[in-house]
Image (cartoon, helix red, strand yellow):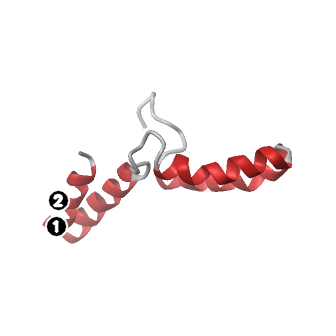
């Protein structure tokens, strides 16, 4: 990994995030937890990402599938996701 890379990126990042969310009930009072959980959808799907928060992860997956299967269609999909 490059020195400036995020340690929890890709699939491992999703796993770390899911484990962190499981701990939230013990870390914040009920009103804040409720707001955080209800806001999660907006942050994942819309806020500042244009709905593309997982676009790079999906592009990487398409690229991996393209290499393993020699699929030009998957390679094209991976490239399109990075635009």
Query: In the image, residue 56 lies at what x, y percent?
Result: 36, 49
Can you identify the residue that label 1 sits on?
A: 73
In this view, the residue farthest toward the bottom is 69
Query: What kind of element bears circle 2?
Result: helix
Residue found at x 49% / y 56%: 11
- The percent coordinates of residue 53 (x first, y second) are 44, 48
| On screen, residue 14 above or below 47 | below
4 and 74: which one is in front? 74
Q: Residue furthest left?
A: 72
Residue 30 visible here: yes
Residue 33 locus on image (x, y percent): 77, 49
On screen, residue 74 versus residue 54, left or right, reads left
Quadrant of residue 61 within the rendered picture: bottom left
83 vs 76: above or below: above
Asked if one can make out residue 16 in the rendered structure from this viewpoint, the answer is: no
Tell me, for residue 5, which label it has, or none.
Answer: none
For the N terminus, which image quadrant? top left
Q: Residues within 10 Å of mark 2 (few under 14, many from 20)?
A: some
Above or below 23: residue 48: above
Residue at 59%, 56% (x, y): give it: 15
Q: Is residue 46 left or right of residue 40?
A: left
**Quarter of the rendering occupied by the C terminus:** top left
Numbered disc 1: secondary structure: helix
Q: Tell me, yes or no, whether the two marked residues, 1 and 2, touch with CB atoms within 8 Å.
A: yes
Q: Residue at x 86, y 45 (%)?
A: 29
Residue on which disc 2 sits = 76
**How many other residues sit within 10 Å of disc 1, few (<14), some (14-19) or many (≥20)?**
few
Gap in angstroms between the C-alphas marked 1 and 2: 5 Å
User: Residue furthest toward the top?
Assistant: 4
Label count reads 2
Whether residue 37 sits left or right of residue 61 in the image: it is right
Residue plotted at (36% across, 52% down) = 55
């Amino acid at each position: 990994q490059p020195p400036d890379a995020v340690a929890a990126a890709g699939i491992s990042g999703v796993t770390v995030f899911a484990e962190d969310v499981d701990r939230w009930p013990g870390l914040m009072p009920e009103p804040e937890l409720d707001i955080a959980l209800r806001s999660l959808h907006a942050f994942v799907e819309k806020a500042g990402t244009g709905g593309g928060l997982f676009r790079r992860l999906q592009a990487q997956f398409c690229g991996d599938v393209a290499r393993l299967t020699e699929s030009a269609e998957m390679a094209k999909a991976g490239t399109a996701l990075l635009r």
